[in-house]
Amino acid sequence: MANAVIMPKAGITVESCIIGTWEKKVGDSVKIGDILFSYETDKASFECESTEEGTLLEIFFGEGEEVPCLVNVCAIGSAGEDVSALRPDGAAAVEEAPKAEEAAPEKTEAPKVVIESTATGDKSAVSPRARKLAERAGVDASLATPTGPNGRIIERDIRELMENPVAAVKSEAVAAAPAVTEEEYTDVKFSGIRRAISKSMHTSLSTMAQLTHNTSFDATQILAYRKLLKNAEGDLSGITLGDIVLYAVSRTLLNHPDLNAHMLDDNNIRLFKHVNLGVAVDTPRGLMVPTIFRADEKSLLEISLEVKQLAKECREGNISPDKLTGGTFTVSNLGNMGVESFTPVINPPQTGILGVCGSVDRVRKGADGSIQIYPAMGLSLTYDHRAVDGTPAARFQKELGYNLENFTTLLAK
Amino acid sequence: MPKSLFVDPAETLAPGKITFNDIPVNAYNKTINEERSRYSDDDLVRIYRDIAVLREFESMLSSIKTQGGYNGIETTYPGPAHLSVGQEAAAVGQAYLLDQNDFSFGSHRSHSEILAKALSCIQKLSEQELMTIMEGFLGGSALRATEKLGKVDDVKELAIRFILYGTLSEIFARETGFHKGMGGSMHAFFLPFGIYPNNAIVGGSAAISTGAALFKKINGKQGIVVCNSGDGSMARGPVWEAMNFAAMDQFHTLWESHNGGMPILYNVFNNSYGMGDQTRGETMGYDMLARIGSGVSPTQFHAERINGFNPLAVIDAMERKLEILRAGEGPVMLDTLTYRYSGHSVSDQNAYRTKEEMEAWQAIDPIITYRQGLVDAGVAGDTKFEEILAETKERMTLICKAASDVEISPYVDFKKDSAVVERMMFSNEKVEKFDDREPEVNMPLNEVPAYKKLKEKERAPIVDGKPVSKMKLFNLRDAMSEVIYDRFYEDPTLIAYGEDVRDWGGAFAVYRGMMDAFPHCRLFNAPIAEAAIVGTAVGYALSGGRALIELMYADFIGCAGDEIFNQMSKWQAMSAGILKMPVVLRVSVGSKYGAQHSQDWTALCAHIPGLKVCFPATPWEAKGLMESALKGTDPVVFFESQRIYDVGEQFHEGGVPSERYEIEFGDVNKVRDGKDVTILTIGAALYRAVEAAKQLSEKYGMEADVINLHSLVPLDYTKIIESVKKTGRVVLVSDACTRGSFMNDVAKNITELCFDDLDAPPVVVGARNWITPPFEFDEYFFPQPGWIIDAIHEKLVPLPGHVAENGCTEAEALRRAKKGV
């Protein structure tokens, strides 16, 4: 008897995934554990191993198609078997009356609790009322999570989106525009992650009042401390300047709750009691931002180890999507790339992001009037002016700089 | 079931036999010479002239239909031509003694009857009277058109032209027709001469003309009523129902000062064929049609079988029948033998009869034999008759030319005035009373015991915070009674009848106690004959009175299908607004009584253009709508529900006002305010919707707007749209089976009108498409509060934590549709 392989559920909050590439084709023989296809959530990419053995009889969804979790993706069995019953196609059940009739007393047909629709995302229908509201509110209806019947986006979904734009993770690929001859370019369809980044960044810049302050601090002490650790034994030697900055941020933010926050809507802000620090990680698929939960309660070493583990999972593409959400503030480090200052883009609905830049030697006049050379490290803070004003933002930066300049004192606290 | 009439077992069970009187068959045997003492030579010649006019009129139509023109005039028209060539002598004989106070109704084959009656009236009326009638008709527009035919000094000749022109341009569908072309060949009439609507439904006039006779009888009007039909109609149930209605014993036993037979003649122009079936020998068993009267009444309807080929034989019979009718001993019946040379219609191939048969009848054609008789008797010479024929043809050519000419006889211009028919659909008038005389009643209103009791009731269900006992509560039934009492004391023409409305007080007690207040002639029990009940009301109303009738259960609408759907609904517009139709038809949607006594058929009635349809669900609505219906001039199907006759007014602040008020047809009644979902209801489903709204609020924090559509036709969508735009979601609930229910129409209109404001398609929650199962299983068939919530959950907005129990997925809906259930 033919059996189906389902789209795995890649995390509690994941409702659907996009098929990446098929490693097997119809007619191939398949063993349990063989890689059948790769798939992506909006945040990560995975490979699906076969749970069945036999011949791959039919593939129900092609590459690039979005499939709700737990829905049959392909059928495996003996050649020639009928797989129509496995096809995830509701219409087939309706077509054949006699069987359906016996098996279809209304009570068993009644759908149970429906809170969030599992239907296709990009193709989601939008109710006229929801569309009208989205237009009026200036939000992209396609970003809403559908909760209406048949996966329809309804009014309350748009209201939810207006309150909580973090849901903004789905998008259409940007269409290529100019008419150029085909040989001159290659069209590349965005991966799920690229699309998520694209959408999220665009939403960020189009819906917030962002601006950036650039400051620098004297990195003498942290550079010395880093040198000290490097010679230490075990994991301590792996602590980087970036880890040190993360530690300082996790402590400093507690005094600046407006920056450790989510904008809920135009009128409400949610202040967090702990610091869930998002850390920007560069991966072959694109930027990913895993979260160090409760960083404010973790030691420098714990932070360092966790960052390394998260970055590894990101690069390998096996990070749980649940670790890619929930950040309350983000740190993006381009210091080792020689960037001296930049404008990091806030990850909505957070209210701030800190860019960590490289250090350069600068001169200053000492207390005795002498000219001193010191390593100055740049900090670029982007904040949402809707939530935070310039002076408090600058105050955070100043305190952060102070804590980094006096890092050993901070450590002692 | 009047107690005054004792059903005596001894008498009932006593032995005996039924005897019959002989029925005369072609008994007339006088010669022209014998009749010359009775008729002047002019009369006898004029009878010939009238026959000739009728013959020429239909010969013209036949020529137009078959050859595309008449006497050199090229013209045609697409409508029907059901001709009665050969039957003219019978029509002329019948009309000879009738005047404008006598009403005649006819069938689809009645051109000759109309013209004969008109010619008879023209002969009897003075020139002054004729001018007044012609000037007054449709503002003189038909007369102006007739005048374009050329100047005539002789008013009678002008009147003949007028009547021929008005009839022909009506057949030609011209605006100058007697009812602006909206009736046409099969529905022509001319009220000023007592010529009442002809009817395209076989036997359709039987109950209507009986109602006209009822109007004359009750309101003391002059004249009698002639119901003309063909022998084919004698097989139709409604015709029998009408004759039985007219023969009711109560007209002699219970109507006191109004005792007396109905002034109606059932005349059958018996041409031996019902279209192509041969009645005698094939499709009927009566042998001779005149026998039918004996099956209906001991008077045998004074029936006779007469020779309709001899106009003098018909006049002779008419004279005797009119005497009987005027003596209050009607109804009467004539089996008037005749023959139709023309086919049923112009497409008739005469497959059902032989050439020999037709030739045999043509050989005794009255246009030959009657003329020959006059010549032989020396009444007039052949030249006179040739002159008449030439003059007739000349006049007819003039008429045909004018009626064909679009300059003189324009069509209604739909391009210029697209609302022309729209304006005719309803008369929308308010008429306090149709006659100024004092209403006939048994006592002053404030002394009527049931009315006094009703006035003492509490008008709201909660008084001073305490619930009012059921017996003391002014309920929906009382609300209707109150208005009916009031209107009975205002409009003397208002009558109420139906099944068991008098002694019983109506099956649902709306008329309880009214027999104390009103004599039989205003409130009486009808036989269990729905077609007759509705059909007579139609005749009563178009004659000038107001009728309130009852069919007990809405399911019985089917028994009066033609009368409701074709007659009550259509005559206002088919008459171009000349006729009014103040009929209020009460029907009650049952419960507990199974599949043939529980149906909400509002959709059937709402589908038919020309009917106003309402369904009050609260006492406040019932009172206001009944007041409005009983003051209006339009036909209303007034739906009620047996589930809620006992309810008090729960929504209108202060309960039901004791003063008079009207609810305009078209209004809706909003009974609950909410912002999250709109629930529209029809009928008793209102109360289940209100319960659902309560649960939605308590369990899901969702607030519903609940709006009851107490008026279906007409329906003003303003408040509905307002609500749906606010909530974006709408559920439509009624007890009608879902497929084809009125709510589907409302849902479709909302979808169109509010599309951009909808968060989901409107969802209709109706009864299942089954028979109504026994009452024990009501909850599986009729919409329940849970169904409404499930529908919201499944189709509008999923409710957190809700588990649908009675839901219907799309797959299930498809399956049901495919199965037709």
Image: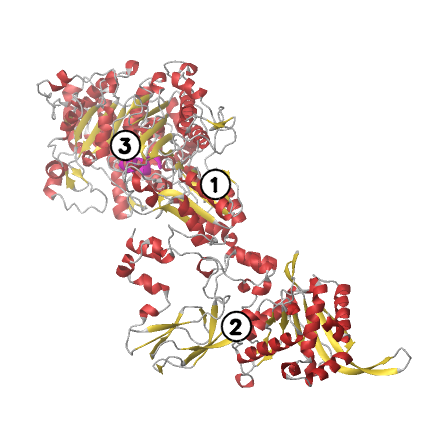
The chain holding disc 1 is: B
* Amino acid type at image mark 1: Ile
Return the disc, 3 or 1, that comes first in the chain's sequence: 3
Quadrant assignment, res B121? top left
Q: Quadrant of residue A278?
A: bottom right
Which secondary structure class fits the magenta region best? helix
In this rendering, is residue B158 above or below B752?
above
Q: Chain of mark 3?
A: B
Please give the range of residues in magenta: B556-570
Residue A104 part of the magenta-drawn span: no
| Residue B414 horizontal/vertical position (percent) | 43, 45
User: Which residue position is annotated with label 2?
Assistant: A320
Q: Position of residue B637 (x, y in %)?
A: 37, 34
Q: Is residue B562 magenta?
A: yes
Report the Cα–Cα distance between label 2 and label 1. Answer: 51 Å
Number of other residues with Cα within 10 Å of mark 1, as a class: few under 14, some 14 to 19, many 20 or more: many
Residue B56 in the figure: left or right of residue B307: right
* Picture coordinates of residue B508, whole percent (x, y): 33, 28
Q: Which residue is mark 1?
A: B707
Name the residue at 32% across, 61% down.
A94
Q: Amino acid at mark 2?
A: Ser
- Which residue carries the number 3 mark? B530
Q: Nearer the viewer, residue B655 or B376?
A: B655
Question: Quadrant location of the N terminus of chain B?
Answer: top left
Label 2, label 3: how far apart the Cα atoms are = 76 Å
Element under label 1? strand
